[in-house]
Image (cartoon, grey):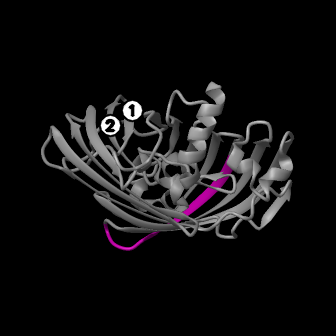
Amino acid sequence: MKRTVIYICLIIFLVPFTSTGQSRKYISQFDFFQSYYNPGLTGYEGSTIRGFVRNQWSGFEGAPRTVFFSGELDFAEMKGTEDPAMMGKNAASLNLLFDSYGAFKETGLVLGYASRIRLTEKHNLRLGAGVSYTTVQLDGNAMTIEQQGDDLLGQYIGAFSDMQIMDFNLGLALTHHKYYLSYAMHQVNGGRISSGDEFMEGRPVNYIVQAGYREALNDHLAVIGNFFFRGQEDLPNNVEFNLKALLMDKVWLGAGHRVDYANNLQMGFLLNKLKVGYVYEFPTNGSYLLPGNTHEFMAVFSLFRSNKRNSPDEVLIW
């Protein structure tokens, strides 16, 4: 009985976030994972290992859960270039994402590459491309009633199926040590290169805009603001804002808002080469989301840099 009630809830509340078995992956701390959304921003913060775990609507069976890992290598930084952020030209990344939501489990691999063109003493134009390979598994025993009635999904009731999709991402970014502006496209080919069971009708193109600004007010306080927009033809626009204060280059506190859906509170710590952060997210009153809250943990490890200012106006996080 409990399982049935939970699935009815998922039918009512999860449908706005899915399209024929697809789910939208949210990252409240999107500003720490810029290169996942835009391959042009690969290596923007140097060579790093990144990861996060997100439990959405915790306490509900079948609720979305996402685990992500990535590695980025700035080739100039590896060679010991004095100022790789400005003098370097190339960077590469490997991204792994594991996502589960209801009857679906998704594993994604994205290889990214970025090249930089120096425009001025402090500005770079970054161009990037990525190749993605995704495997989606469907458990026909765990589908909701709404999914069982779908023309495509209904034929897989009681069976286990999987589908493989290859696609491409493109990105462009203007960067400065105090601000950035970027535009990217995910799934440029619309999921047309696929194999296995056909329980999805393509994957619509995603259009993504990211922007951020940061300023060191004094030796002990810096402020950081970030903006995120994502558009997709079969889903509502996703608009998010994050605002943080970095205290004594050691602790940050912040808040975020996903328009029409959720608010969040953020905190994190800077160690020698490690950044760790936590987000507590809760739905807005009018969002019609499940009442469970969301927890998100992230970590970023710098392979070569330390979390120390090299100049008085440098800010150590986005």
Residue lying farthest to the front in this orientation:
1
- Kind of residue indicated by mark 2: Gln
Q: Report which residue position mark 1 lands on.
A: 278
Cα–Cα gap, marks 2 and 1? 6 Å
- In which quadrant of the rendered view does residue 123 lie? bottom left
Q: Does the magenta stretch include residue 109?
A: yes
Question: Would residue 78 be found to the left or right of residue 223 on screen?
Answer: right
Q: Main secondary structure of the magenta part?
A: strand
Question: Would residue 164 be found to the left or right of residue 220 on screen?
Answer: right
Residue lying farthest to the left in this orientation:
218
- For image coordinates 46% across by 44% down, the residue present is 289
Q: Report which residue position mark 2 lands on.
A: 266
Q: How many marks?
A: 2
Residue 240, position as x, y percentages in the image: 37, 55
- For image coordinates 78% across by 52% down, the residue present is 153
Q: Give the range drawn in magenta.
A: 108-121
- Kind of residue indicated by mark 1: Tyr
